[in-house]
Amino acid sequence: MGLALMVLIWLITLVSTYFFVAKTWWLPVGAAASTGFIDGQFALTFILMGVVFLAAQLGLGYIVWKYRETPSSPPVSYSHGNTMLEGVWTLLTAVLFIGLNLMGSNVWASQRFDREVPADDVKVEVTGMQFAWYFRYPGPDGKFGKTSPNLMDPSAGGEAAVGLSNNDPAAKDDVVTGTMFLPVNREVDVSLRAVDVIHSFFVPQLRFKQDAVPGLNIHMHFTPTAIGEYEIACAELCGLGHYKMHGMVHVVSQEDYDKWLAAREAEKQ
């Protein structure tokens, strides 16, 4: 029985490890400027944790087999263990996790704080609500108009869903859509907010994932580098209609982006 259990533990460990080594459970090909350093940090974390996982599981299987019950086994006895070994293991684990967090902090900050704001960045406000995403562009004046919770009517969709105030001159040219369009190779400044509960705006190909929290306006930035259509998923279970929190990001040429934005502006006239 001990031998069978050891083989089963090792088999599950090695098969699950194969899927990660072969990258069958991996992120899709990146389409953002941040892909390189995010994937690098991701791979480093997986390699280090994978080594620990393999060592622990293979050791577990060996211990299960070595100390299996046999006719000549002595009576079971319990001990406190080895205090020094526990201390060393705890220290090494702490160093590993703190080290990974310090290394990852640069990657984390690079999408939030480390930024020289380009004059031609694309500003998009992303609003999550049960159960849809809305995207607002500031229009030719480059300014977002005022919104108010009192004006929000999610059932109406569009501008009413985000509570856009028509009394604000800056709101006159704001464009609100249910689909995100972005020009390729231009930095995007995302202003992320949520209306009701916590949502999570996740676009795997753009290596972008951030919770949208009610009451907070969270700024992040990224630069799409490849034209294409990329799926948006809500990575936070946000209610019974969570499966509806689906959308698309269309990364297009600058010319196509200008045409799309001009068409949306024309619809407002």
Image (cartoon, rainbow, N blue to C red):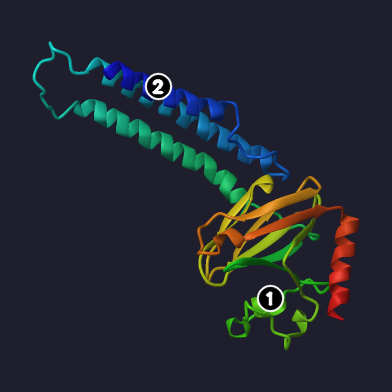
The image quadrant of residue 232 is bottom right
The image quadrant of residue 122 is bottom right
Quadrant placement of the N terminus: top left
Task: Label 2, secondary structure: give it.
Answer: helix
Q: Which of 61 and 29 is in front in this view?
A: 61
Q: Which of 45 and 201 is in front in this view?
A: 201
Q: Name the residue under label 2.
A: 10
Q: Which amino acid does label 1 sit on?
A: Gly
Instruction: Name the residue furthest bottom.
Output: 167
Whether residue 67 sits left or right of residue 43 in the image: it is left
Specify whether residue 145 is in view. Answer: no
Task: Label 1, secondary structure: give it.
Answer: loop
Specify whether residue 159 is in view. Answer: yes
Residue at 80% across, 49% down: 185
Q: Position of residue 230 (x, y in %)?
A: 72, 50
Q: Where is residue 187 in the image (x, y as percent from the top left)?
A: 75, 54
Distance between mark 1 and mark 2 Cα atoms:
53 Å
Q: Name the residue under label 1.
A: 157
Residue at 84% across, 71% down: 264
